[in-house]
Image (cartoon, helix red, strand yellow):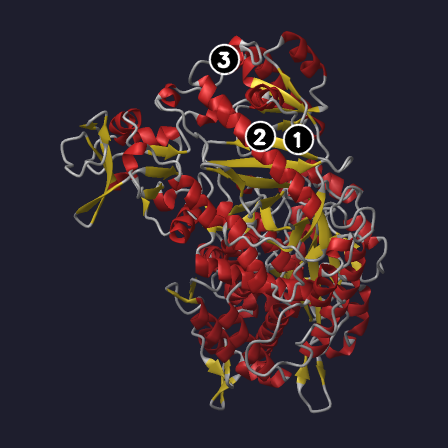
Amino acid sequence: MTESLQAAIPQAAAGSGRTDKSGKHTLTLGVEEELHVVDLGTRELVPQAPEILDRLDAAHFSAELHRSVVETNTPVSDTLDGLRAGIVERRRSAITVAESLGLGLVAAGTVPLVDLDRLPVTPTSRYQRMLHEYQMLVREQLICGTQVHVGVPDRDEAVAVAQRVTPVLPVLLALSASSPYWMGEDSGYASVRSLVWMRWPTAGDSGPLHSAAEHEELVSDLIASGTISDPKMVYFDVRPSAHVPTVELRVTDASSDVETVVLIAGLFRALVLRAQQQHRAYLNGASLDGASLDGASLDGALLNGTPLNGTLLNGAGGAIPSARPPLHRAAMWRAARSGLEGDLLDLPRSPVPVPAGVAVERLIGELRPQLEELGDWEQVFDLSLRALSRGSSAARQRRALARRGRLADVVDMLVSETRGETSWNGGTSPAGAGLSGVMPDAPRLEAYGAAGDEAFPDGRVEPAYAGMLPVLTALGASGLRQREDKRDDEQRARGITFSVAGEAATRLFPFDLVPRIVPAADWGHLRTGLTQRVQALDAFLTDVYGDRQIVSDGVIPEWVVNGSPELRASGALIRRRAVRTQVAGVDLVKDSTTGEWRVLEDNLRVPSGIAYAMQNRRLTWSVLPELPRPAGLVSVEETPKLLKRALLEAAGPAAGDDPHLVVLSQGPDDSAWFEHKMLAEAMEVPVVRSTELFVDEGLGSNSGLGRVGGRRGPRVWRLRDGHRYPVDVIYLRMGEDSLVHSPGADGMPLGPSLVSALHADTVVLANALGNGIADDKAVYAYVPRMIEYYLGEKPILADVRTYLCGLPDQRVEVLSRLDELVCKPVDGYGGDRIVIGPHATADELDALRRQIQTAPHRWVAQELVQLSTHPVFDGHRLAPRHVDLRAFVFTGKHSTVAPAALTRVAPAGSMIVNSSRGGGSKDTWLLG
């Protein structure tokens, strides 16, 4: 607190506070708030508090132990309304400065996104000494609390008050609980901050103290022991302040919601008043029903909690009951674990747990006489109802993460709440509760300037985005956040989710609200080049599993083919010449320096994303219907029809005139289960699991179907509800290894019998087994030559220059330029094991060098392409993010480029767009 608190407290009042014009008792109030500093782009905790503090009044704002924290000190107030106004004004000043620097402030016990190595201690001699002495405790002190001060100038009385309020501190901690996350992980606690805080040697309960002299003696002994160096390092849960004449509450987490701070301050002030009354009653003697009490009788009344003139007495002061520290620690632990969503110990009544709501209601009921005396009853009562109905901040943060599995969403919620962007949802709004007019306006959504940006190159607005930008600007940040909530609700209702390996829960598919526009000229060029590329790759697959003429003619080295991990014997099962790639996904990037589109990767095994591209369009029209639709916008709704046609045209001669198609999936455990279901429904075909399929070896059909060379061959059937249905084409949405080992309807592995049906040409797998060799990163380097070899044409689409580490001369160049190139394993996918040289550490490059030297044929390197960027809404503003484009080509009798493409978005500071690596997506407006 600032020195103004000391000056404002009437010295003659002996700590009794003041009496207002209506005769109500008052005690002065003040609050210290610790605020985390986060980068609004990355949402990570950053050590930039000094930059904010340099622009703020040092009388009201100060540094803390870590450079990632700003501390605010409110003016002294007589009322809760005045306290609220002070908190809001201090936040307003700090947030205005922070946001001008691209930073946000978070009032919470912890923030989830933390890089410990980037968070130094504030470089004062005191903090440096603390770092030297306490080591890990200081390095990991990445927590923020709220300290409430109530004016009690008499130090003896302040000690007595601190002793008396201690039993109910767990309830105040539970109300404040706002720190479920620690170092990027869910701690399982509502207030992990309190656990981190309790590691300090002077944190917690002070133990029995009867006077200021005893308190000062204890502090002196702690300093003499070398445990602490000054009185400010006494971190008791509640204490006489070391620097102002107050009683200071120190147990609570920082709270993003100002009303929670006001509620806790109101309750604490009432507790202080009650403790004062009890202490003075003890000192002055008291009467029960008019009878005078001697000291022994008074002690007995106090110890039994006997009501004294309407006030519950919980012995302290000179008649302090014996403390039971283990029970108090247990109660504090339970509050940290549960917050408002579990049980709290019912101290001091009983150690038996009760629901948190019951504990809060009982405390407020007991404090009603003091709250009424202070004029705070109605406001505190309403605020308590609001707090119990909303639940703890910890629970709200977990709900924010559950929406789509992104910790950045938790930070966005906390930044918004700290700014005051919350509504009053219960009872009569206390004066000043509406904060939207007090906090600074949200930053205006506007174009930024970024070289190579597709929408705002060098600060200009591309004409294609001229109609879109005014709509986004009119909605503003708060409006777009509301639309994001609607988007999440729609995704949840439609089941638009995906899963990540190692995670039990599914996530909402990340979707940014700002659509991407691909101009008609670009899309026309891409369509032609994509068709050309996929036709050449399909010809390569037929050749490589046949005569290998391309190898014989020296176009591609034999070691590239034979050394590929994805060369499979099963690829040779197809006997007739047929299309092997019914569905291809091609990943493209736009070079921000040249504006040229380049192919980054080919996906001919099990490409995903078609359904997500379609749903992104539907979400856009549902969530942002006011966006103007540009001329020539291609509809995505024909995509399932085109896909089905290509798949049915793949059927072999045994299928007859009416081929039967199924979508084969691993079911809900598959990361793209939503897509499998949606595409099957849109094509009006069944989605099945392996346990619904079996192969009849030719003894069970008299229909003539499945005849091969005049005899019946093995035939695949679908079994459901006791009936079997023929299967001619399987749209394969699982990997080959999973397929081969999955059980069939008879409980036996499906692979061997399915192989016999493939060899007999009675079923077609789309895509064919063995197609993964075309995805090989070493094979990628030869696709331009394939196009010329098979089609006799020059490549239309550019590639990224690729070096094969299996070639000695190219390996030498790669090893000399590891810090400049992007290195990939030849069989990698999904961003797996990619090392981006300019972004890698020395240790990462050293490990990469050893891997390449050990198995050079398993690695390729590519020149770093400066990917174009596109605006995303990051929760506060429009910001550039790197993007790529996955286009889809369907091939039956002819190749057709799908009218739906998926734009994938890299996280802030990254160039890897995969959703499993934290990437997102956006609606892609293809213009024709």
- Disc 3 packing (10 Å; few <14; some 14–19; many ≥20): few
Q: Is residue 328 visible?
A: yes
Q: Secondary structure at mark 3?
A: helix
Q: Position of residue 718 (x, y in %)?
A: 24, 42
**Is 328 placed left or right of 521 in the picture?**
left
Q: How many marks?
A: 3
Give the residue pinned by disc 2: 533
Report the amino acid beneath label 3. Gln
Give above or below for 871 relative to 289.
Answer: above
Could you give the CA–CA distance between mark 2 and mark 3, rounded to whole angstroms? 19 Å
Q: Which residue is mark 3?
A: 549
| Placement of the N terminus among the 4 image quadrants | bottom right
Q: Circles 1 and 2: CB distance less than 8 Å?
A: yes
Of callouts 2 and 3, which one flags the residue occurring earlier in the amino acid sequence? 2
Cα separation, mark 1 vs mark 3, equals 24 Å
Q: Position of residue 316 (x, y in %)?
A: 54, 69
Left or right of 547? Residue 127 is right
Image quarter for residue 140?
Answer: top right
> Which residue occupies 58% across, 31% down?
532
Q: Nearer the viewer, residue 7 or 620?
A: 620
Mark 1 = which residue? Answer: 796
